[in-house]
Image: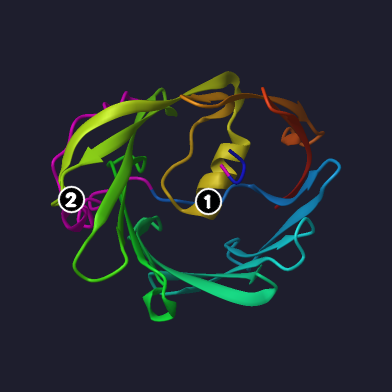
Amino acid sequence: MLFASAFLSCEKDTTTPGGNTGGTTGILYNMTPPSCLLSQASIVGEGDITFHYDFQKRLIRIDLDIDADEKNEFSYSGNTMTETNTYLQNGTPETNTIIHTLNGAGFIEKSTDDDRSTGGSLNENFYVYNSGGYLIREIEKHSFDTNIFYYSGTSYAYSNGDRVQSYRLQFNNMGDITDSTLDVTYTYFTNRTGHLEHWNAWTQRKGRGSEHELKSESGSSYSYTLEYTDGSNGYPSKMKQTSNQNVVELDLTWKCN
């Protein structure tokens, strides 16, 4: 989850990924930075994740104590956000670059990750939002060459400003959506403002965040619950994630205006 009003129905759709790139017009929601930004998440017993921002409060770098060889950097130019990920692959430094195209509201409309020149694949992700700024559909177009494409995708439903369900989309060979299946269910603490949700939305730029703090997430093969402890500024200072496999605890540090 961390590194994760009116009801918006999740209807069957038959548009193609190419058509979806035009589905972000008419957004009536303007994205603005939250009052407080997460500056560090310390995973108890493992290490720190530190977040850096520019003067416009945009995310520009993520440092991971957990893996000192991994680095994530972000740069901005016009309606383009470039994400550069550096990591070790079999002891050799590798760099992966993803180009994100932003729409007028500041949300990612299309992401392109093209590694074909080095023997990899082409991945294109398309994002569609409703007029309220909520992400309602994302589709991935995947190919190892220029002739054969594979499609996968997810659509989302909301209630009272919170994302409550996600659906796995099915496609035909032409990339048209043919059906959908309920995949994940979310619940929230309705008495808690979604500070982490708002921060997540600002840094990921994939639509408006849920209004309340996430309480649980449940899929077909996994589930977990979350607990929070607030600091003196009213923002979560501790978070505990409990699943059948393990318990993860984080100490959260915020930087406010």
Residue 137 seen by the camera: no
Q: Is residue 57 above or below residue 171?
A: below
Tell me what residue is drawn at x 62 percent, y 37 percent. 195
State the SS at label 1. helix
Position of residue 108 measured from the top left corner of the image (x, y, whole percent): 39, 57
Horizontal placement of 100 versus 143: left or right? right
Position of residue 102 measured from the top left corner of the image (x, y, whole percent): 37, 63
Horizontal placement of 69 versus 100: left or right? right
Farthest-out residue, front: 90
Residue 243 seen by the camera: yes
Horizontal placement of 31 versus 104: left or right? right
Q: For label 1, count other residues whose C-alpha is less than 10 Å away and answer few (under 14), some (14-19) or many (20+).
A: many
The residue closer to the viewer here, 216 or 8, is 216
Tell me what residue is drawn at x 32 percent, y 25 percent. 6
Q: Is residue 36 above or below residue 234?
A: below
Disc 1/disc 2 C-alpha distance (Å): 30 Å
Badge number at residue 175:
2
Position of residue 139 measured from the top left corner of the image (x, y, whole percent): 30, 49
Q: On the image, numbered disc 1 is attached to which residue?
A: 202
Which residues fall within the magenta stretch? 4-29
Which of the two discs, 1 and 2, sits closer to the camera?
Answer: 2
Farthest-out residue, bottom: 117
The amino acid type of the residue labelled 2 equals Gly
Farthest-out residue, right: 45
